[in-house]
Image: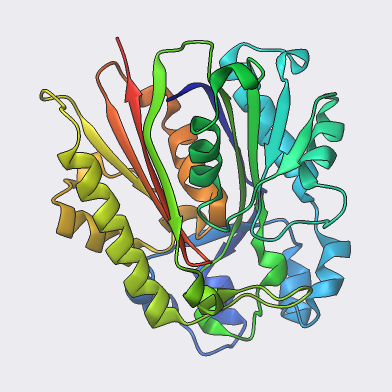
Amino acid sequence: MLYLHGLGHFYPDNVITNQFLEDLDIGTTEEWILDRVGIHERRTGLPLEYIRDTKNSDPRAAYAFIQHCNARAGAAAARMALDRAGLALGDIGLVISGSSAPDTYTPAESARIAGELGIDAPCLDLNSACTTFGIQIHFLACMRPETLPPYILLVNPENLTRVVDYTDRSTAVLFGDGSAAAVVSATVPSQMVFTNAYGNSKPSSWDKVTIPRLGYFQQDGSAVQGFAIRKMTESLLMLKSSSHFNGNRFIFVGHQANLGALRSVCDRANIAEEHHWCNVEHFGNTGCSGAPAVLSQHWSELRSGDHVAVALVGAGLTWAHMLLNIEG
């Protein structure tokens, strides 16, 4: 069990529309994109002119052009989470970050985020690609509460457009940049509580999704799609069967891979459209920040009695789930 005190999100201003991608002349159209992944637009921290002129031909060069590094983007999301939690920077006793494409290998990216915020506290990174937020929650929920500080800041910054090959239509249409953050506690109660946290992996399939160092995102699309739908459905059905909802809302938030995959999960798990929260159609796949950012965007809509099932999948291959209960 882990208490949630605040959530935050951040997206850069530059918008990659389907028309922009069509104009890149990479063999795609808006109709093809919507039919394939259901995404209308995504955000990027890169200048649109840079993508148009170079198609990101050298992903190493993109780091010099990014307008929001992971530290600044993650800090922006963290400030929103802290404000919603009603906490000051000095209240945070531990900072944990995780990203599918970190800016630095040394130091830990959490240290750069804490430095950007002005937080002096222990820092560490805990990454598991797109399941990072779920694994962070699972990791902390497994620890003895008395060993943890009162408040912990989790940050998931993702600037994935830097590692996208914009000559490859299969990946160019998918990804956007976005960041999310959460303030949690194992000892200080709140109205919102994470329960049923779980994480696992299938390392024999690690090569199905990769981002080589200073390289492009790569995946076995059909294999990953099938895995994602299957594991999110299994997680969702497990959470539904193991809880008593007494007529209250049961809401699903999944990994924001693409709209088709999420709708398939909803169909298989009998989730009504009004109980499915997503943002992939407007922001694309933003890696590990996707699901917590959806929760953050619906922060004001959460009400007493709600149960929010979060089901995630990612490279590794990994999967994770948890239940967020809103108590009266």
Q: Vertical placement of 285 versus 122: above or below?
A: below
The image shows residue 293, relative to residue 281, as above or below, that is above
The residue depicted at 39 percent of the width and 70 percent of the height is 37
- Nearer to me, 142 or 286: 142
- What colouring does the structure picture have? rainbow
Q: In which quarter of the image is the N terminus?
A: top left
Tell me, yes or no, if residue 255 can be seen here: no
Q: Quadrant of residue 88?
A: top right
Answer whether residue 310 is visible to the viewer in this image. Answer: yes
Q: Nearer the viewer, residue 113 or 45?
A: 113
- Indicate the quadrant where residue 30 lies: bottom left
The residue nearer to you, when weighing 19 against 231, is: 231
Residue 130 horizontal side relative to residue 196, left or right: right
Image-based side of 15 in relation to 326, left or right: right
* Residue at screen point 56% across, 41% down: 136
Vertical position of residue 122 compared to residue 277: above or below:
above
In the displayed structure image, the side of residue 310 where residue 142 appears, left or right: right
Tell me where residue 85 appears, x and y as whole percent: 58, 16
- The spot of residue 101 in percent (x, y) is 70, 61
Q: Which residue: 31% across, 34% down?
A: 308
Residue 94 rendering spot, x and y as whole percentages: 72, 27
Q: Give the quarter of the figure containing the C terminus.
A: top left
Q: Where is residue 174 in the image (x, y as percent from the top left)?
A: 51, 69
Q: How many labels does the image show?
A: 0
